[in-house]
Image (cartoon, coloured by chain):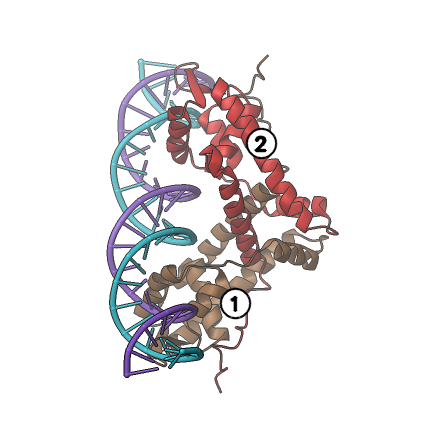
Chain colours: A brown, B red, C purple, D cyan
Amino acid sequence: MDTPASSAPLADPMAHRLGYLLRRASSTMMADLGGALTPFGVSPVEATVLAVIGANPGCTQSDIARLLGIKRANMVPIIARLGAEGLVEKTPMNGRSSALRLTAAGESSHRAVEETMDRHEARFEAMLAGHDIAELRATLMLIIQPQED
Amino acid sequence: MDTPASSAPLADPMAHRLGYLLRRASSTMMADLGGALTPFGVSPVEATVLAVIGANPGCTQSDIARLLGIKRANMVPIIARLGAEGLVEKTPMNGRSSALRLTAAGESSHRAVEETMDRHEARFEAMLAGHDIAELRATLMLIIQPQED
DNA sequence: GCTTGATAGTTATGTATCATAACAATAATC
DNA sequence: GATTATTGTTATGATACATAACTATCAAGC
């Protein structure tokens, strides 16, 4: 009546579910990236924010939050940490918002982190030889939905 | 010298990165699934554990942890919650481990949750019309790496 | 002017997921 | 019988995310 289970390999009732596979694949890559970034003392999220500020000098916290799908409130500790490490500086803009820029240390950290992410990505793309990575990216972008904050 | 940024749309330096796209896609689907499951009072992780126990009656906590890539220690509160809600029962096996089974309430919760997840998946697969979903699944499985605990 | 509404940044707080390290009890092996 | 591996557990910390509420600023309208 009951499947014997235990000791025999388990049936995986989630293996066919897209959401589950995305979650597992995402956490595999996040763990790898986290490990690759430890020498630089930045988390994956901090690395991402560095990249955004590097590509958009003068942007605001809210800009970044919208782009990355992060809540405004959760940007505070991230920017505070990057500021405390001397990687990002805020210059008051019109009074209500601040323009964010990389410091010199932030620029060099940014370059190192970007190279690390390139290698990280290349490592995984190598595992996907024979698969259409452009198509994979396009499909993932269809799934991603804009956050409405 | 500096890109104007702010008020103009931001450049997205992460849009081409697989890891980033996976993270965003995963969190989009997780949020949607979480919403779909709220009527049943179970989280996505609890729903997944219900599915595994339903498919493998008599399995142990450690079995589930290995299958799902969750640490043994983190299974404790999950099983405790499912037990407290009367969905899962533990029967001592050989002394060191317990066999997990769904209760009657767990079975009916399991069925409801499975239907909800089917609809959830179908909703997203509909957005991917014209794309090869089997190929997407195969590619994601290549990325997922076994956890060594 | 002054009021209304939108936005930026912040504070406080709660929750979920995951990680590590250590421990007790049991089982398996030699 | 001693060693080793495994199961379940406790304790603890980090991270990412959510909500709600508050202040300060700006933009428009009357």
Q: Of helix, strand and loop, which one carries label 1? A: helix
Residue B53 in sight in this render: no
Mark 2 surroundings within 10 Å by alpha-carbon count, few (fewer than 14), some (14 through 19), many (20 or more): some
Residue A77 image point, x, y percent? 33, 61
Callout 2: residue from which chain? B
Q: Point out residue B142 in the picture as x, y percentages from the top left corner.
A: 63, 46
- Residue shown at 50%/47% (left/top)? B31
Q: Which residue is mark 2?
A: B114
- Kindly indicate the quadrant of the structure image that contains residue A16: top right
Rendered view: A91 above or below D18: below
Q: Quadrant of the C terminus of chain B?
A: top left
Instruction: Please name the amino acid that badge 2 sits on.
Output: Glu
Residue A126 lies, in percent from the top left, at: 64, 55
> In which chain is the residue bearing label 1?
A
Q: Is residue A39 left or right of residue B110?
A: left
The label nearer to you, 2 versus 1, is: 2
Residue under pointer 1: A115
Left or right of B50 on screen, residue C26: left
Circle on res. A76: none
Report the Cα–Cα distance between label 2 and label 1: 43 Å
Residue A121 in sight in this render: yes
Residue nearest the viewer, comparing B55 with A117:
B55
Instruction: Give x and y (percent) for residue D18.
Output: 41, 51
Q: Residue at x 49, y 78 (%)?
A: B5
* Furthest residue in direction bottom, as rendered: B1
